[in-house]
Amino acid sequence: MKLAIVIMAAGKGTRLKSKRSKVLHEIGGKPLLTHVIASASRIVPPEDIYVVVGHEAAQVENAVKDTGVKFVHQTEQRGTGHAIQTAQEAVRGYDSLLVLSGDVPLLKPETIAELRDFHLGQQAAMTILTASPGDPTGYGRVLRKNVNSPEVTAIVEQKALTPEQQSVREINSGIYAFQAAPLFAHIDELTNNNAHGEYYLTDIAALLVKAGDRVAAFEAANPAEVLGANTIAEMMELDRVLRMETARNLMANGVTILRPETTVIDATVEVGADTVIEPFVQLLGETRIGEDCRVRSYSVIENSTIADKVLVRQGCVILDSKIETGALIGPFSHLRPGSEIGEGAHVGNFVETKKAKLGKGAKANHLTYLGDAEIGSGTNVGAGVITCNYDGVHKHRTLIGESVFVGSDSTLVAPLTIGNGAYIAAGSCITEDVPDDALALGRSRQTTKEGWATLKRRPEEKA
């Protein structure tokens, strides 16, 4: 049995009031469509997944091109039935199809697999994935032959329900399994005699029943999996559900998250056991945090790797950086892309780094900018030190050796090399290389005039 998955992602999503394609809106740090493709890829190889694109097609394709899926272009968006008509030639040769919606991001691969297996076991021409949410208002209802029967007689839209059908809570999710042959035997019989003038895939159920083919229903265990979003508010509710699930999974594996409802943790984040995440922390992208760490409140960490036993104090921003075991960061540090903080190193309050590498035990504790720099192990960088890495045209590197002492308020003008064990006097402007174990000073000599202040005050005293 050769199976393909078709993901419908051509719609605009007008109720979102957004210029972007609906499936490119994000929850859990990833576009809706990316979540669906990830689940589908657990069922079939990416080359057997066909994404139907239409509105903002180029942007949609660009967003998911690295997944390896194929694309079908629905140049005119004339409904879900028309989308499958458009995909017919692309999926020729497959025995069965699973049709998913690109805006249903919580659907799990396990549920897709259960739908597939149920469909094959029922030998149905069409199987509808259904659900029974607490409030089914707005959804089409699935009518079965009887309560215990898997067979479906009709799908009735909300506005067409009779008084007797109002009590039916089982809804059509818009996710289906099909045998390809009966589907395409009747797909061209769809009509657009409706308010929107579109061809609806939902109507294929009635055509198949009329032809004597078997239409079945399979109810998802968790209704939340099949719910989409038609407004930004509904989308943010899906985001909340997904992020809370991510937090629960982390906590189940030994991570302590204080007030998880206040955190923003992407589904792609990994955190080791016995790490503590305080309230109002954001962990984003491909961030990896080791064991026995603590991330204090209001810190934002994105696409960064943090080893074991690291303390990130309050209010730090860490982007595309790497932090080794036992390092101390913050409070209020800003690690920009390319920063590498060594084992046991300290990056303190209001210190900014960019493409800077601090060796083992190196310290920059206060009010410092280190850009395009390499600092050796055991070196101490004093308060207010800056590396002048940009000359207005090019960036240059500053290389500081091991066990160097850089005095406070020093300016290091790159390109520059400071040797091992050297001392830089406080307040110096250093423009030339400094050899090992040397003392470098670059400031004007102090002048002291005794009694000057007394003389200055005397006219005021007379007045």
Image (cartoon, rainbow, N blue to C red):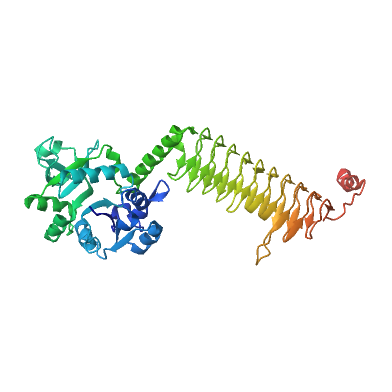
For the point 72% across and 55% down, the residue is 399
65 vs 215, left or right, is right
Task: Tell me how many marks there are.
Answer: 0
Q: Quadrant of residue 197?
A: bottom left
318 vs 343, left or right, is left
Residue 54 visible at all: no
Q: Position of residue 414 (x, y in %)?
A: 72, 60
**Is 56 placed above or below 338 here?**
below
Q: Position of residue 45 (x, y in %)?
A: 33, 54
Q: Position of residue 107 (x, y in %)?
A: 31, 44
Q: Residue furthest right?
A: 450
For the point 53% across and 41% down, the residue is 289
**Is 333 placed above or below 78 here?**
above
**Is 142 placed above or below 196 here?**
above
Q: Residue furthest front?
A: 1
- Front residue of 192/219: it is 219
For the point 67% across and 52% down, the residue is 370
391 vs 60, left or right, is right
Q: Position of residue 238 (x, y in %)?
A: 35, 43
- Front residue of 83/344: it is 344
Q: Quadrant of residue 65?
A: bottom left
Residue 335 visible at all: yes
For the point 65% across and 47% down, the residue is 351
Quadrant in which the C terminus is drawn: top right
